[in-house]
Amino acid sequence: MQMPQSLQSRDDPGGEDAAPDEPYQTLSSRTIWRSPWYALREDRVRFPDGSEGQYTVVEKAASVYVVPVTHDGQLVLIRNYRYPLGRWLWEVPAGGVLPGAAFDEMAHRELLEEAGGQAESLEKVAEFYTMPGIGTESAHVFLARGVTLGQPQPEAGEAMERHLLPVEDVLRMAASGEIEDGLSALAILLCAPRLQMSKKSGEDRNLTGA
């Protein structure tokens, strides 16, 4: 499988005990099910111990996660109803990347659709794999600053509400587990140093009257 270029550039541990580059050998591969959102691939593989068996892989496009902050320092969260769980969850705006689209383009799009937001600046913060044991999806986290809010434009079938909360409250919610969507919580915590630095810079400006 092809991984994002920036995730290919990990340092090679090297040394005599380094793991082989390809400990699994793919003997055959076929797609057994496909939807507009993801597909299931069934591979026949030879495992590292020499035995053979099946490995089912979830093929899913990359996704973007946007942590949006308004001009007055409020963080925008989405209250999203998740049908498989039958529950409302706190989340950040997020969505899959369309074929051929740039990650930053999709971040702007998801911010507009789910929060009605437009950002003055967008910073790529991190990227990681979401389910490396069973699937191919990578997540790309962006911090959106100077966000102005208009009317959200959710897709058909989505049930969500927009909320504005103080940054420190959202950081506490992510750290305490109150934000139960793990990827949203991770996106927020990855942005935490930048959020705290921005808050301190704003406080310093207020003290100096700048």
Image (cartoon, helix red, strand yellow):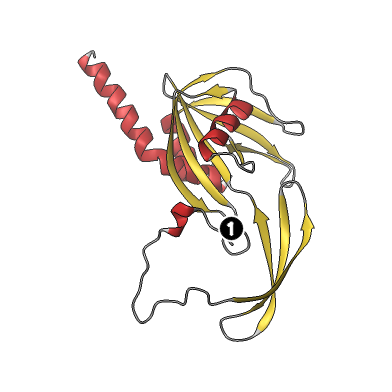
The N terminus lies in which quarter of the figure? bottom right
Left or right, residue 54 beside residue 123: right
How far across and down, in percent of the image, does residue 93 sit? 58, 34
Q: Nearer the viewer, residue 138 or 92?
A: 138
Residue for point 34% across, 28% down: 199
Residue 132 at x, y percent in the picture = 56, 61
Single out the residue that lies furthest toward the left.
Answer: 208
- Counting from the top left corner in percent of width and height, residue 39 is at 73, 55
Q: Is residue 9 visible?
A: yes
* Residue in view at x 37 percent, y 68 percent: 12
The image quadrant that residue 152 belongs to is top right
Q: Nearer the viewer, residue 122 or 189?
A: 122
Q: Quadrant of the C terminus?
A: top left
Foreground: 51 or 93? 51
Report the number of numbered marks. 1
Horizontal side of 122 relative to 48 (left or right) equals: left
From the viewer's perspective, is residue 162 above or below residue 178?
above
Snapshot quadrant of residue 161: top right
Mark 1 is surrounded, within 10 Å at the Cα level, by few (under 14), some (14 to 19) or many (20 or more) other residues, namely: few
The residue at 60%/22% (across/down) is: 116
Provide the secondary structure element on which disc 1 rests. loop
Q: Is residue 15 left or right of residue 99?
A: left
In the rendered image of this protein, does residue 86 appear above or below residue 46? above
* The residue positioned farthest toward the front in the image shown: 100
Q: Residue at x 63, y 28 (%)?
A: 113
Whether residue 179 can be seen here: no
Residue assigned mark 1: 131
- Near-viewer residue (98 or 55): 98
Q: Amino acid at mark 1?
A: Met
> Residue 89 location, x and y as percent?
63, 39
